[in-house]
Image: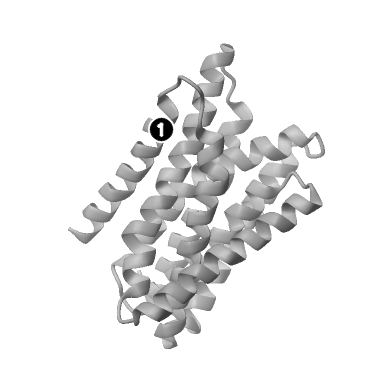
Amino acid sequence: MNELTRLILLTLGAGLAMPIGALVASVEHIKSDWLESEFRHSVIAFGGGALLSAVALVLVPDGSEGLAPGWVALFFALGGIAFMALDRYLAWLNTKVSQLVAMLADFIPEALALGAAVATGSKTATILAGLMALQNLPEGFNSFRELKESGNFRTRTILAAFTLMALAGPASGLLGYYWLSHHPFAVSAVMLFAAGGILYIVFEDIAPQAKLERHWAPPLGAVAGFLLGVIVEMFVRG
């Protein structure tokens, strides 16, 4: 398998996790209210754990490699500030697509970094693709529920839109492959920027939604999400 084919398959596979998560949400129905609430909050927490694993295991270690601490701090902080600005703008618009925008906002920079990683022959590519898929599944699940509850979209419309959005993965990956791979400083900047933004999302949006009073499954879901990311990383690195 040549590099371009591998890149397209990795990015497309990670992207298709979004409509798969949405499909699960479209058929998921638990009759018990408390169990349904526990399940949904656990899915949210699992996504948070997967996002944190991407930050801790790939984006920050690889992004900071070879950079001075000042640059690391700058790009990481810029990511957090940019995502905060986006979050505030969406709140001002009072829109029901905040989860969807957040999903794309971390997916696209990661796909760019993935394309550059494939071009340089880094093992990080496979690890990052696996972590992207892990986080896109619950994000697709939550984004579908958010859009569906707004009452403005049909199930088929949402699933079709999510499937089309998966194509943003290969498009971004190819851009990273042909352009970013020749600019290692830019690759590091993108990784750290994405890491800062993801960390903001986790603690501003995902963690508060995952909490339920006197329920312990959601936090365990976060542990499971992070642990699965660790296992993927260890398996690929050998």
Q: Is residue 45 above or below residue 61?
A: above
How many labels were placed on the picture? 1
Instruction: Look at the numbered disc 1 and give the secondary structure of its residue.
Output: helix
**Residue 115 visible:** no
Residue depicted at x 59% and y 20%:
29
**Residue 79 visible:** yes
Q: Say few, some or many: other residues with alpha carbon within 10 Å of mark 1 (under 14 / 14 to 19 / 20 or more).
A: many
The residue that label 1 is drawn on is 219
Residue depicted at x 54% and y 77%:
175
Quadrant in the picture for residue 151 = top right
Q: Position of residue 148 (x, y in %)?
A: 72, 35
In this rendered view, identify the residue nearer to me: 236 or 52. Answer: 52
Q: Position of residue 230 (x, y in %)?
A: 28, 49
Q: Is residue 54 above or below residue 66?
A: above
Residue 186 vs residue 66: left or right? right
Can you name the residue that lies furthest to the bottom here?
182
Residue 178 vs residue 105: left or right? left
Q: Position of residue 170 (x, y in %)?
A: 53, 66
Quadrant in the picture for residue 141 = top right
Q: Is residue 204 above or below residue 210?
A: below
Residue depicted at x 36% and y 52%:
53
Screen quadrant of the N terminus? bottom left
Can you name the residue that lies furthest to the top here?
32
Residue depicted at x 50% and y 25%:
39
Screen quadrant of the C terminus? bottom left
Q: Mark 1: which amino acid?
A: Pro
In this rendered view, identify the residue nearer to me: 191 or 169. Answer: 191
Quadrant in the picture for residue 146 = top right
